Amino acid sequence: MGLHQQIAPIQEPSSESCVTVGTFDGVHKGHQALLHRLVSVAQQNHARSVALSFRQPPRSIIDPTHKTPHLYDVEKRVTLIRELGIDTVGLIDFNDEIRVMSADEFLTTLQTSLGMKHLVIGERALLGHDLLSVDQIESIASRKAFQLHVVPPVLQNELVVSSSLIRSALAKGDVKRAAKMLGRLYERGGKVTHGAARAREMGVPTANMQSSPDLVMPANGIYATWAKLPDGRVLPSGTYIGNNPTFATGQFSFEVHIKDLDEELYGQYVSVEFIDFIRTDDEFDSVEELETQIQKDVEQINRIFDSMPPRT
C-alpha cells in the first residue's frame, strides 16, 4: 500500500493537523523534544497532533545489510509516544511505493490526507528519495502553504542523543548512560519459561525469560534491576544475561532473581528495568567459586537498593 492508503484510517474530515514523521525507536530525549514541540504547536493552533512512525527504519529496508535490533517493539514505542500527549499515532510500513516518493510528493500526501498545516522535524532530517534537507523542505513549505518547525538535536556530553548511541551504550553494559539518553531506565522482558534450575540449587532462584533477537539486549553480565510483575508490583531484583560459561553449555540465559519472592511465574510476562551494571559474565574454576561470587553479587545489589528511595 502507498502512503495515502496507509494513513487513510487516521484521517479526520475537515481536521487540520500538526505532523511529524520518523521511526522514533527508543523515544529518547531527542525524540521527546520533537514530540513535545509537536504537541505545543498543535495546541497553539487548535490542531490535531499526529506522529507517523515507520514500523521498520527506512534505512534497513533500503539496505537490508544494515538491519539492527530495535530498542523497543512497536507496541511499546506507540505507548511511549502516546504518553507524551500525542493525539494520533500512525504506523507506516516503509515499502517500495513510499521509497520512490519525492519529498514533494510525500508532503503533498500529508497535506491532502491529514490536512497538515504544520510539519515538525529535526534539523538533521532528510525527506523523500531525493533526500531533501531542512532548507529545501522550507522552500516546499512556502510554496505549499504549510508551516515548518525545526527542532535542534538534544546533546549530552557534546554528543547528539540518538538510538545508535543508546544501542552502543547498552552493548557495553553502560545502562546508566543509556538511561540518561532515554530519559528512563531501559526495559526488557519476556515470558517466563522453565530453565535448568541451577540458580535455585545455589540458593538464588530465578525466573528465566524468553528474549527476542529483534530487540537490543544489554551486554552479558550481572545487573541491579527493578522487576515488573504482571500484577503491577515492581520489586528489587538482580538480572543475569549470559552464556553460563562456568557450566560450558553455551546456552544463553536471561534470568532475574527477585528479592523475597517465592511464587511461580511460569507462563507470565515479566520485565526488568536496568539500574546499574555489577560485573561481567565470568567463568569460574568451580561451581563453589561461582556460588560465592553470586552471594557477593546479591549483597552488592542489596546495598544499591538500600541506598535508593522506595519505588513509588
Image: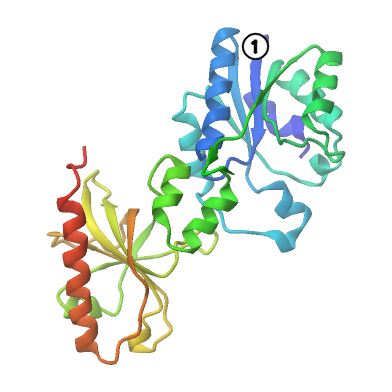
258 vs 4, nearest the viewer: 258
**Residue 98 figure quarter:** top right
Q: Give coordinates of residue 68: x percent, y percent.
A: 62, 59
Does the image show residue 221?
Answer: yes
Residue in the picture at 39% in, 52% down: 176
Q: Secondary structure at mark 1?
A: loop
Left or right of 252 in this view: 132: right
Q: How many marks?
A: 1
Left or right of 98 in this view: 219: left
Q: Quadrant of the N terminus?
A: top right
245 vs 176, nearest the viewer: 176
Q: Give coordinates of residue 104: x percent, y percent.
A: 85, 27
Residue in the picture at 81% in, 46% down: 96
For the residue marked with disc 1, what is the amino acid? Ser
Q: Give coordinates of residue 308: x percent, y percent.
A: 20, 46
Answer above or below: position of 253 versus 271: below
Residue in the picture at 26% in, 51% down: 229
Does the image show residue 187?
Answer: no
Residue at image mark 1: 15
Answer above or below: position of 158 versus 299: above
179 vs 97, nearest the viewer: 179
Answer above or below: position of 129 versus 227: above
Q: Give coordinates of residue 291: x percent, y percent.
A: 20, 81
Q: Quadrant of the C terminus?
A: top left
Residue in the picture at 37% in, 72% down: 280
Answer above or below: position of 301 versus 139: below
